[in-house]
Amino acid sequence: MSAAELYGIIASFPTSDAVKEAARQLRAQGIRAVEAYTPCPVEGLDALLPQRRTRLPLLIFLGAVFGAVWGWFIQVWDEMLNFPINVGGRPHNSWPAFVVSTFEFTLLCAVAAGFFGLFVSCRLPRLSHPLFAVPEFDAASRDRFILCVAARDPRFEPHELRHIFERQGAEAVAEVPA
Amino acid sequence: MTATLDETDAMRVVAPGVTLRSLSEEVSARVLRPAPRWWWIGFGVSLLLLLVLVVAVAWLFINGIGVWGVEIPVAWGLAIAEYVWWIALASGGTIVSALFYLTRSPWRSAINRIAESMMLAAAACAGLMPILHIGRPGLFYWLFPYSNVMGVWPQFRSPLLWDFVCLLCYILMSLMFYYVGLLPDLATVRDLARTRTKQLFYGVIALGWRGSSVHWRRQRTVYFIMAAIMAPMVISVHSVVGLDFAGGLTPGWHSTQFPPYFFFGAIVSGLALVIMLTIPIRHGYHFEDIITEYHLNALGKVMLVGSVMLGYAYLWEAWGAYYGSDVATRTMFNARVFGFYAPSYWAKLVLNILIPQLLWLPRVRRSEILLFLISLGVIVGMWLERFVIVVTSLHRNDMPAEWGNFYPTLWDWATLAGSIGLFLTLFFLMLRLLPMVSIAEMREIVEQKSAR
């Protein structure tokens, strides 16, 4: 199988320390398109992989601001503009009474922004993925720590990578068809 | 964002033999294997109780709320008491899962799925009650601010509408929080499923989660922020339920202490229900290795704290009535403590405050039977508390000519039994379809332990 038809090559490691060591070596060799698939977050692994910062916290904050403004507006629009009722001459924009609903709506919009933002930024749902076709990949959701070098890396060379992984003590190495 | 374990905690929070593989396979097997017999029995009983609810609600919708015992002066009856009761039980689930996530308590990971499932099932029951109570259930959607030909919107200044907004936001947020935490576990079940139907079902709801480092980092970031939002949210939800009452001029309701008072009650009763569900699941699903005595001990302590805080609120409730100069409040409080409904007042004191003090003893916290019984007592006691708050306050209102007692009818009790049926049916379904222990978070604890 030629490199052009591959998504990449994966190697499975038994422990989180082994996968971290392997990632460190790949990084030292200048291989960039590396991703790890693990049963749980591994401390210190992120720093070894090329990643962009996530802007999700900012998105959640913007969701909160949007919720606060919109939640407030709904109430002011109704009680002040749409159907003003004079209650003992009190102001129509009776803000203390609007605080509770505004607060709840703010939190709802913040959580919703995080929820949908998470899926968009993780490109989910994606029910079909080349990795799912490889039997060895299953164990990444149980007890195996898997490294994948994608074929888009300029230094991608399946045979060489297979040797590297085997030297690093990988339990299984498999090529992932595109 | 992981739980930080010290040496001794790590030994006690998971049994020594648990590995990443055994943990993942054992928990998933509960979902993938055929259901055990106790599940079928429990689910069958739940369905029967649900049937009671269907009949009770049908009878109510045909005849109107006259089938209940509600009358003037006690126009808020069991439906409202049970609304408050259910929403308090639901809050307990969020307290365990969100508040103790922020404190990084190691015992939270094994039981947060049980607590959150309980929360969703109880919130459904809570949401149902006001709809049954309003008398014109078909018009409940008037609570939504939507453009309509009448040109009228809901009254946003009313605490009752605040409550509706709170409950709606709470349920939606809880669903999102639940799902974000569940996603990695669904992927584990998907990868272990062997039949086509299960592979398809879990494959679709796992959304293609792959556990890449990008996925994990974003999921943990969002989950942490969500937990930080859910914690004040749950406090506000039950506080606003308290405001429903505090906003009314009825003696016994019109009190500034109600929001925290209600939240304290939510801690006690919510934790009690978590304990009552955790103990049978622990043995039924053989999770003794993952849900250890350490967890039950911690739950017992939190329930005790809640009980002490609730006792403080009870004290100030009585103090306020006698220290203040409002004759109506004092008259009502005398009737509450010494009158027709006195047994329910004293019973709630015994069940919610007195008996839970046994939890100070480590031996009691280690005994599952005692923990279960104390929790059952608290659940009953909290139902009585809601009954006392709603009914006894109304039965001695400001107008002596209106005074009168409330007698629940058969249909009141049928609605209570039926709502328990709805709760259990939903809970048994989640128990069957979803992994009942947060596998991903437990894997983190096991991994941390083995790294040491």
Image: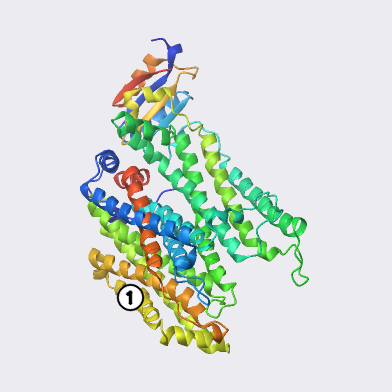
Nearest the eye: B422 or A150: B422
**Would residue B176 be found to the left or right of residue B417 on screen?**
right
In depth, the one of A45 and A62 nearer the eye is: A62
x and y, in percent, of residue B396 in the image: 51, 83
In the image, taking residue B221 as reference, residue B195 lies left or right, namely left
Question: Which of the 4 quarters of the picture holds residue B354?
Answer: bottom left
Query: Residue drawn at (61%, 55%), measured in percent from left and top?
Result: B142
Identify the secondary structure beneath mark 1. helix
- Displayed quadrant of residue B216: top left
- Residue, x 57% and y 84% (percent of image)? B399
Where does the image place residue A91, in percent across and percent down from the top left? Answer: 77, 66
**Residue B377 placement (x, y as % from top left):** 32, 70
Amino acid bearing label 1: Gln
A171 lies above or below B165: above
Q: Can you see residue B107?
A: no
Q: Residue furthest front?
A: B63
- Between B210 and B381, which is closer to the camera in this rendering? B381
Residue B246, horizontal then vertical, whole percent: 57, 73
With respect to residue B255, does B14 lie above or below? above
Count the marks. 1
Q: Residues within 10 Å of mark 1 (few under 14, many from 20)?
A: some
Q: Which residue is mark 1?
A: B357
Residue A143 visible in the displayed image: yes
Chain for disc number 1: B
Q: How is the image coloured?
A: rainbow
Q: Specify the farthest residue to the top.
A: A2
